[in-house]
Structure formats: structure tokens, C-alpha cells
Image (tube, rainbow, N blue to C red):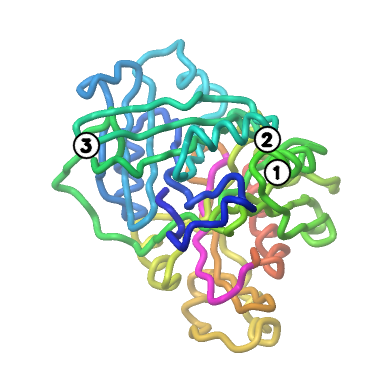
Amino acid sequence: MSKTSMAAAPNTQTDFLPLEGTDYVEFYVGNAKQAAHFYKTAFGFQSLAYAGPETGVKDRASYAIRQNKLTFVLTTPLRAGNPIADHIYKHGDGVKVLALRVQDAAKAWEETTKRGGKSYMEPTRFNDEHGEVVLSGIHTYGETVHLFVERKNYTGAFMPGFKEWKTVYNPASTGLQYVDHCVGNVGWNQMNKWVSFYEEVLGFRNILSFDDNDISTEYSALMSKVMSNGNGFVKFPINEPAEGKKKSQVEEYLEYYDGEGCQHVALATNDIVETVTTLRDRGVEFLKVPSTYYDDLLDRVGHIDEDLEPLKELGILVDRDDEGYLLQIFTRPVEDRPTLFFEIIQRKGAKSFGKGNFKALFEAIEREQELRGNL
């Protein structure tokens, strides 16, 4: 997905890995052609670029789609017996690559691998008539990887190996803007290991922590720590299960995804009521909280600019921190496996992640788990 911002370049003396934001998120999927149609129709993305046999890429087909500063790549294997096909067989459709925009992909790789990062791709130059893109990458939790993308010398639609993909059918945007954060689910007692990884290998810092007293219901619990890079453009909360009476949502994810992975991608909007109304009308399904959540909402969060009735009708949650408030809502899983979902978020000053909504949200998730027989 495209970069969150392009503020002044961070001070590289204090930040050995200056990131310009999320470049794109790549999903490995069983049928990329149909997945691209879904994200265009339901979420308002538009056609951007295509790679496949016609462009010299023999083992896969990839469709890049874009909405404002948000870019998804949907990739499917063309034959069995390769890492992409194996990934989908094991995990179902899911996030493979969280690509991060950098000025110098070679330096990003050197800095992270010398600090203990396991190399996924050594710095590699890709060229075509539009210039050059340099990619490098490291492994993170599960089979997820971070690619470092240097595209300052490139003017093409997406990157070499892709050609511009033009289609007659390009539905209107739903107002989604950029990646706010991406959440990873890791195994029992693995959260602190990955927190240390992001601190030591990527120079991130832990800006928020939630324990099972913060994130728990009658039945299940989890722990979470939010990792942010130096300029705040890239945030990765990391969840692990905690002991509860029944199976937590993180345990369910780990079971169905068959390992650690990206649980959800939070997409920012400037008008959540309009965005969620449009998404709902296009068939996107959202988790709903009981209407009683709204009975004392304004007592909990104070004045908000929005009318309460549309929020109540749509099921949008509100939370406040010291710097403002935020509005958020979560889709139901977008795959048949109860794994990947999306968050839609609008920040009105708040820098936090909706701690006050956790109980209501998790009870909504548990109602879904119970329907699946997995609580």
C-alpha cells in the first residue's frame, strides 16, 4: 500500500532505517483475477498493473490495484509445487509481503541483516524502460516478509515486470486512503520475542502495551504490543494469546491459518460514515456490537463531531485518548477461513488503537466464533 506520508526525511543519524511508509501489501491468493475483482467491486480499488506470462513472469500472475495511497498486490501461482502454491495450501489466502518504502534498499537490507534479520532477498535491481526499482527483504513472524522498496528512479505504473493494467470497469473509490497499521498474530509466549526483533532489527519502539486485563472477556484474552518506526509512519501491533476459559480469537487464527501471520490491515479514511456506508452497500460485512454500546457512549468519550445515529446504525466504535478520538469498525473475515479481516479507521487526533472498545469488539468476535463452533 502506498506510503502513509511524505513528511521531511527523518534524521538518519537517529534512525538507521528511515521508512517513508507502507509501499504495498501483497496477498497470496487462490485466484488473483477474481480477488482483484472483489477488491475493486467491494472496496473501491482501481486497476493499476499486471504481471504474468504475458510480461515474462512465468510462475505466477499478479494484479496490482490502487486507491489513493493504498496499493494491494494479489498474486496467484500458475502451477502446483511451488512456494506460492504451498503457502496458499497451508494458510489459505493471506498476507505474504508487507512492503516498506525506503530511499536506499541496499542500506536497509545491510542495516537489518547485520542486526540479526534473516535475509529474504538480497538487494536486487529491476529495470525496464521506465527506470529502476531496487528491492531487498527480510523474514518476520511466520512466513510473512518485509520487502524494502526503493523506487525513486522509477516512473512506471508499478515496477519492472508489470505492465500498466487498464480496464473499462473501475468502480468509484470508497474513500480509503492509506495503511494505518498492520496487526500480526504470533504464538504462545512469542510476542516479546517479536517485539525485541522489531526493536533490535528494525529500530522500532514499543509505543503501547495491552495485557489480558485490558483485552479480555468472560471467555478469552490476548496480549498486544504496538511497535512503531521512528517517524510513526509504520505501525505493527503484535498479538499473542493469553489464558482464558475458552479459545481466543488469536488461537482460532493460529489454528486456521496454520501458523503465525498478519491478522488484519487497518485502512484509514477521512469520512468513516461515508466509507462504511459505501462498503456495506457493496457487500462488505462488518462485526456488529449490541446497540447498548451507544447508550452511554458520549459519557465515555465526550463530545464528538459526528451524529450518533449513523454510527449506531453502522456499528462504528468510538474511543478517546489524550490527543483526540478515533472511530473504527472491523469487517468480518474476508476469507472462508476465519483469518484475514480489515479495520476501517478515522483518526480525529487520537494516536491510540481503541482500547476502550476492546471488550465490546471481542464479544462481537466471540459471537462469530460461537456460530462457527470454535469458541
Give the side of residue 314 with respect to residue 183, left or right. Answer: left
Give the side of residue 203 with respect to residue 26, left or right. Answer: right
Q: Is residue 82 above or below residue 176?
A: above
Tell me the residue that label 2 is attached to.
254
Q: Taking the image as drawn, is residue 251 in sight?
A: no
Kind of residue indicated by mark 2: Leu
Kind of residue indicated by mark 3: His
The quarter in which the C terminus is drawn is top right
Q: CA distance from mark 2 to mark 1?
A: 6 Å
x and y, in percent, of residue 251 in the image? 72, 39
Q: For mark 1, does the 10 Å Cα neighbourhood hold few (<14), some (14 to 19), or many (20 or more) residues?
A: many
Q: CA distance from mark 2 to mark 3?
A: 42 Å
Residue closest to the far front: 13
Kind of residue indicated by mark 1: Val
Give the side of residue 119 with respect to residue 277, left or right. Answer: right
Tell me the residue that label 1 is attached to.
250
x and y, in percent, of residue 83 in the image? 49, 18
Q: Is residue 48 above or below residue 139?
A: below
**Is 346 covered by the magenta stretch?**
yes
Which circle's residue, 2 or 3, is located before the other in the chain? 3
x and y, in percent, of residue 121 in the image? 50, 24
The region drawn magenta spans 338-351
Q: Which mark is residue 130?
A: 3
What residue lies at 49% left-to-right and 35% top-to-bottom?
Answer: 147
What residue lies at 67% left-to-right and 52% top-to-bottom?
Answer: 227
Residue sitting nearer the eye, 73 or 332: 73
Residue sitting nearer the eye, 369 or 357: 357
Q: Nearer the viewer, mark 3 or mark 1?
A: 3
Q: Secondary structure at mark 3?
A: loop
